[in-house]
Amino acid sequence: MYFAGVDIGSTMTKTVLMDTNNKVVSAIKGPTGPEHRQLANEVMKMALEQANLQLDDISYIVATGYGRLNVPFADRQITELTCHARGVLSLFPDVRTAIDIGGQDAKCMKINSGKLVNFVMNDKCAAGTGRFLEILAATLGIKLEDLGDISLKSTKKVQISNFCTIFAQQEVVSRLSEGEKLEDIIAGLHDALASRVAGLARRLKIEPDVVLTGGVAKNAGIVKAMKENLGCELLIPEDPLLTGALGAAILAKERFSKATAKGEPIPTKPRRLEKATFFTKETS
Amino acid sequence: MAWFIGIDIGSLYSKGVIIKDDELSAYYITLSGANYRTAAETIRQELLTKANLTQDYITDIVATGSGASSVYFASKKASDIVCTARGINSIFPSARTIIDVAGQSTKAMRIDRQGLVANFAVTEKCAAGGGRFIEVIANVLRIDLKDFGPLSLHSESPITFSTGCAVFGESEAITRVAEGIPKEDIAAGVNKALADKISSLARKIALEEPCAICGGGALNIGLIKSVENTLNIQLLIPPQPQITTALGAAITARTSSLKR
């Protein structure tokens, strides 16, 4: 038996296929793009090919993330907070604080005795999310994935305001024209993002172990800046993008196993990879 | 006769005025650009040319705005809030509240009869809280900034922005354009979003009428109407709302030289 988790984020779509022993048999990431519905199908198709499986082989599918309603073949939708917490817990059982920096939001979760007990999030302002780095990388003409390594060369970071992406863009241009070094500016940007997210996290009481996830966690400069701003060590999953999808797959297995153990019927969607004609309603 | 210059170096635009005693002789507005010193120098030259004067006629120069320290030839710097209040007070002596919609932020202030500031509130440096939001969306809609206000007045159903962020607002505007929503509804939605922020700022300082509006944002008639509707008041608008603070700086120059 196999289970699937599909996480449609604002920027990336992630799919994890898992067997009954919680072993990941395939994991695929692709851009979300403007047409979530089509791309969810594409990413699922790739995941199935990688594991050499058919959609019929998947017993239960959970969709999560901001585009979770746009997965026509998902049997159930679960919020990204629940899925993230579950995914992080499966990798780091001692986690108490989980911070996820997504493409367009940032979430901080408090976990206690294996349960999500509190959270704060910012989805109202681009500063303090992946979008901040994306825009500023474009302003600097540097690839997003190169920011981290360049920033590590910095010896003195340039102060950049953490309040507004648009004004940070203006500041970066001014600092460049004043002759500041690229690595110092990028280090300043990382610090601006990290201080914003750390401020959010401090609204919950930060307790170790602290785990950092989301695409931004792949940037070594951000990890360094987050450690400095939080004043503690950070645990990072091997693939920080996949925790939401992983959590969704685990929850799929748990819900399915619980229902079958009780002998309850568990409704599933037709196993067809087709384009949705319209948003499917969230099932409860 | 004596002439005084006030120069206001803002984040986006730099403004200068030259006054002869009580009377405005000339004004000049230019982009601040990357070098504020150059902007300040250009303004001084243009003002002198426009007023047909040489530097020798100028009794005093006062600088204000975020780039005030770049006006190396000014004899003194003055706070932009004080200058805005003085500028409005000279045009509308009855005004008790001022809303200044600038490029980077919006200010609201209460002033007394003498034009002294009693209380004020400023938005954070957030693009969605000032004129920059309008620029960002005008760019998405490919319309000229000066057409933004008049266009928005044609809207019958303004869109509602689900976010308070100019970056996310930009994406939202692009989505609405793709959905075929008319430009005027998007423009009116932007004005409404900004008007809501401005209004809550004005309420914070317990707005008292008459209320004047100035800054570049006051050039946007759609924004003015939207603020008027939200607060249910009539706003006083100076003929050149962008130069109010520079005017206040020139008045400050005159006042301090009279004291001497």
Image (cartoon, coloured by chain):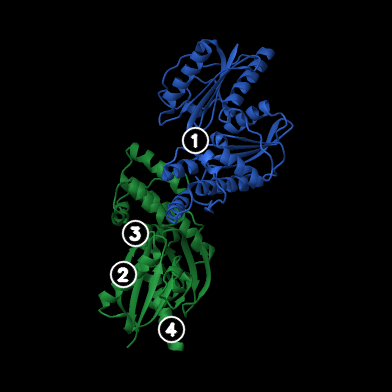
Asked if marks 1 and 2 touch (Cβ < 8 Å), the reply is: no
Q: Are marks 1 and 2 on the same chain?
A: no
Question: For the residue marked with disc 2, what is the amino acid?
Answer: Tyr
Q: Quadrant of residue B102?
A: bottom left
Q: Determine the residue positioned at 42% across, 30% down.
A: A33
- Mark linked to residue A145: 1
Asked if disc 4 and disc 1 are in contact, CB closer than 8 Å, the reply is no
Q: Which residue is mark 4?
A: B255
On-image quarter of the N terminus of chain B = bottom left
Amino acid tagged 4: Thr
Which chain's residue wears label 4?
Answer: B
| Secondary structure beneath label 3 | loop
Chain in blue (letter): A
In the rendered view, does B47 fall on the left or right side of A213?
left
Q: Mark 3 vs mark 2: tell me if same chain.
A: yes
Q: Which residue is mark 2?
A: B28
Chain ID, mark 1:
A
Q: Identify the mark nearer the N-term, 2 or 4.
A: 2
Q: Is residue A94 shown above or below B241? A: above
Rendered location of residue A51, percent (x, y):
53, 13
> Do the residues indicated by labels 1 and 3 lie within the same chain of the protein?
no
Q: Nearer the viewer, residue A91 or B194?
A: A91
What amino acid is labelled 3 in the image? Asn
Residue B164 appears in view = no
Residue A44 higher or lower than A208, as above or below: above
